[in-house]
Image (cartoon, rainbow, N blue to C red):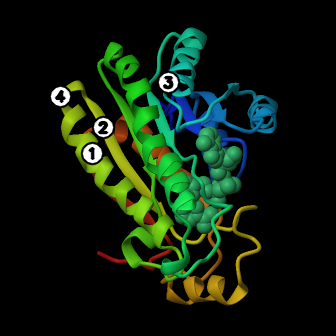
């Protein structure tokens, strides 16, 4: 097999794939041979067109990851389209709307909304997809957390708490699904320049940049190599792990 066939014959669902990091994951996985379900609550047509313009295969499915029926429809659509589901990147999140707020002032509705999408959404999508992975006798799930789950971040308690839950859910699900050869891992990005973050305060961006061993801006493309590795058979004995991809900010 040559390198650019690493994901050949695999069907991968990417949630939150209409834009930003999810779009970069989708385009990269397609370039390694995977068929991609571009799953998002907003139109994913741009991502599908990007993939098709490079000769890849993709289909948009509208989903609300926090809704059980919608997540089931997404998984079934993927299976009906390609006859299999091998990978899932749980990337969708209530993120760009999150405002820096002192912890005493976070509104209960906002707390509940962010947990609904960022935590329940991963549960629902994984629950919907794993039965199809069992049919193939295996699969790979990547949950997207954040460096803030490891490092903390003032003014972001609700978001930090959801991303910490993602780390724990990865471990719990990995232990429970290992018998089905379903591997579950986390990628925790650093501060990445996307449409969601480009208007965050400059001094905040600078703090992240200065803390890195590799002191430059992080782009969505910096994350894709780790995702392709985790979705491919190269990582077939790797499960339950947190992969921090942040230019060497956090070091274990
Ligand atoms: N950009 C960063 O600095 C950064 C850092 C660490 C982690 N992350 C994480 O990376 C992921 C992507 O971030 P991004 O910067 O590309 O953000 P983004 O806002 O550009 O992308 C999020 C996508 O999720 C979709 N989405 C939101 N709620 C949804 C729902 N209920 N159902 C379906 N789709 C939904 C949105 O439509 C959007 O396309 C998120 O999980 C985020 O928490 C981002």
Q: Which residue is mark 3?
A: 10
Q: Which residue is mark 2?
A: 183
Tell me, yes or no, whether the two marked residues, 1 and 2, touch with CB atoms within 8 Å: yes
Tell me, yes or no, whether the two marked residues, 3 and 4, touch with CB atoms within 8 Å: no
Q: Which residue is mark 1?
A: 239
181 or 197: nearer the eye?
A: 197
Q: Can you tell which of label 3 and label 4 is closer to the viewer?
A: 4
User: Is residue 50 left or right of 71 when viewed as pictured?
Assistant: right
Q: Residue at x 49, y 51 (%)?
A: 118
Distance from Cα at disc 3 to Cα at disc 2: 15 Å
**Neighbourhood count class around disc 1 (C-alpha, 10 Å): few under 14, some 14–19, many 20 upward:** many
Residue 28: image quadrant is top right
Which type of secondary structure does the marked residue at label 1 adopt? loop
Is residue 118 visible in this depiction of the protein? yes
Pick whichever of labels 4 and 1 is earlier in the sequence.
Answer: 4
The yes-or-no answer for disc 3 within 8 Å of ligand 1 is no
Pick whichever of labels 3 and 1 is earlier in the sequence.
Answer: 3
124 or 223: nearer the eye?
A: 124
Pick whichever of labels 1 and 2 is earlier in the sequence.
Answer: 2
- Percent across and percent down for residue 74 are 57, 23
- Percent across and percent down for residue 141 are 40, 38
- Percent across and percent down for residue 218 are 62, 70
Which type of secondary structure does the marked residue at label 2 adopt? strand
Q: Which residue is mark 4?
A: 179
Which type of secondary structure does the marked residue at label 3 adopt? loop
């Amino acid at each position: 097999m040559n390198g650019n066939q690493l994901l050949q014959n695999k069907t991968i669902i990417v949630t939150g794939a209409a834009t930003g990091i999810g779009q970069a994951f989708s385009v990269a996985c397609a370039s390694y041979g995977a068929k991609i379900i571009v799953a998002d609550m907003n139109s994913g047509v741009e991502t599908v067109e990007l993939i098709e313009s490079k000769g890849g295969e993709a289909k948009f499915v509208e989903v609300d990851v926090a809704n059980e029926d919608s997540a089931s429809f997404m998984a079934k659509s993927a299976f009906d389209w390609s006859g299999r589901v091998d990978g899932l990147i749980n990337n969708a999140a209530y993120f760009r709307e999150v405002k820096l707020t002192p912890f005493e002032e976070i509104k209960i509705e906002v707390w509940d909304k962010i947990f609904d999408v960022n935590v329940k959404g991963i549960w629902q999508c994984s629950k919907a997809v794993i039965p199809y992975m069992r049919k193939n006798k295996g699969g790979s799930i990547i949950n997207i957390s954040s460096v803030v789950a490891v490092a903390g971040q003032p003014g972001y308690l609700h978001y930090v708490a959801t991303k910490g839950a993602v780390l724990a859910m990865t471990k719990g699900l990995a232990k429970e699904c290992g018998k089905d050869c379903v591997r579950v891992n986390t990628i925790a990005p650093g501060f990445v320049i996307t449409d969601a973050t480009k208007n965050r305060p400059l001094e905040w961006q600078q703090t992240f940049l200065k803390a890195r061993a590799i002191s430059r801006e992080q782009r969505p493309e910096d994350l894709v190599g780790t995702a392709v590795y985790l979705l491919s058979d190269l990582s077939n004995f790797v499960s339950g792990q947190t992969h921090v991809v942040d230019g060497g900010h956090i070091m274990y």
